[in-house]
Image: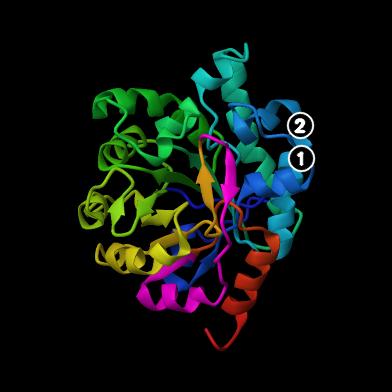
Amino acid sequence: MHSARTPDSTPRRTLGDALAEGTVLLDGGLSNQLEAQGCDLSDALWSARLLSDAPQQIEAAHAAYARAGAQVLITASYQATFEGFARRGIGRAGAAELMAASVESARRAGAETGRELWVAASVGPYGAMLADGSEYRGRYGLTVRELERFHRPRAEALAGAGPDVMALETVPDIDEAEALLRAVEGLGVPVWLSYSVDGDRTRAGQPLEEAFALVSGVDQVVAVGVNCCDPADAGRAVEMAAATGKPVVVYPNSGEEWGAGGRGWTGKGTFEAGRVREWQRAGARLVGGCCRVGPSDIAALAGRLASSEV
């Protein structure tokens, strides 16, 4: 895999190089930042709708996290699929252009900082396209081969836009993880694989040890771990992911709970920047936040990472 290059064509470190040297800071939840900017995300396409309707809002959200100290910006392509865009009358060529635009938007926002940043192209689970909450359950009734056929075209479109890494994220079960790993084979882009979990199991109920073991011997995978989970579940999951010998990625939610029926968040936030020390000791090298974790939280994490206390 080739090294990513800056606009002046100077070779720079790959994300894998950076992970070998220390901890790298991810951004936070894109949707909550977009909502803070006044965006309406009630559409089935969620934040991906804005790639077409308000791309400047996407770039502004990325810029907010870059200013907060994030070193990796995750694209607005989590819910971007050919099928989802087709329901809005956008053909395959147009959909591919929007997926590529998600990478370009994050790249522009990162470039404005003058710092070394990486862009992670988000590849969400099949259930995200359904927009019915099944992304938190998995077990869609599809075979691994069928899931691979669904994911491969969008993975190709995103890889073609030149991200530094692809984030195979919020994966609810082992079957979909296997399908995603097959779908990205041969695309020439490193990936990380992160599960959405409940305690020490995937959302579909499978043991995390089995889920993480899927990446053993897969050189394309530069990190494995969890995201979109309760912060209380993150520490133990990091320990189990570290057993693979891979760098660990961890970016939980705020601790509030999402109700798919009411399409809203309830409960109290429990995300604390101080947890980063626990995660690092357990093996985490990519740390950040997911839903409801905002720029101020990422800035607090950046402060912790820069502190001699960590």
Q: Do the residues bearing badges 1 and 2 touch, measured as CB atoms within 8 Å?
A: yes
Instruction: Judge whether 137 appears above or below 156 on screen.
Output: below
Residue toward you, 223 or 160? 223
Residue toward you, 45 or 219? 45
Q: Amino acid at mark 1?
A: Gln
Residue 5, position in %: x, y? 59, 51
For the point 69% across and 57% down, the residue is 65
Instruction: Judge whether 81 appears above or below 19 on screen.
Output: above
Q: Secondary structure at mark 2?
A: loop
Give the total of numbered labels. 2
Residue 238, position in %: x, y? 35, 66
Q: CA distance from mark 1 to mark 2?
A: 6 Å
Residue carrying label 1 = 57
- The quarter holding residue 145 reads top left
Q: Which residues are magenta?
A: 261-286
Residue toward you, 177 or 203? 203
Residue carrying label 2 = 54
Q: Which mark is residue 298?
A: none
Q: Is residue 102 left or right of residue 152?
A: right
Q: Amino acid at mark 2?
A: Ala
For the point 62% across and 15% down, the residue is 88
Question: Can I make out residue 32 in this image?
Answer: yes
Residue 282, position in %: x, y? 36, 74
Asked whether 196 falls inside the magenta stretch, the response is: no
Q: Is residue 239 left or right of residue 252?
A: left
For the point 57% across and 72% down, the residue is 273
Residue 47, position in %: x, y? 64, 36
For the point 54% across and 62% down, the residue is 288
Instruction: Judge whether 22 appears above or below 14 on screen.
Output: below
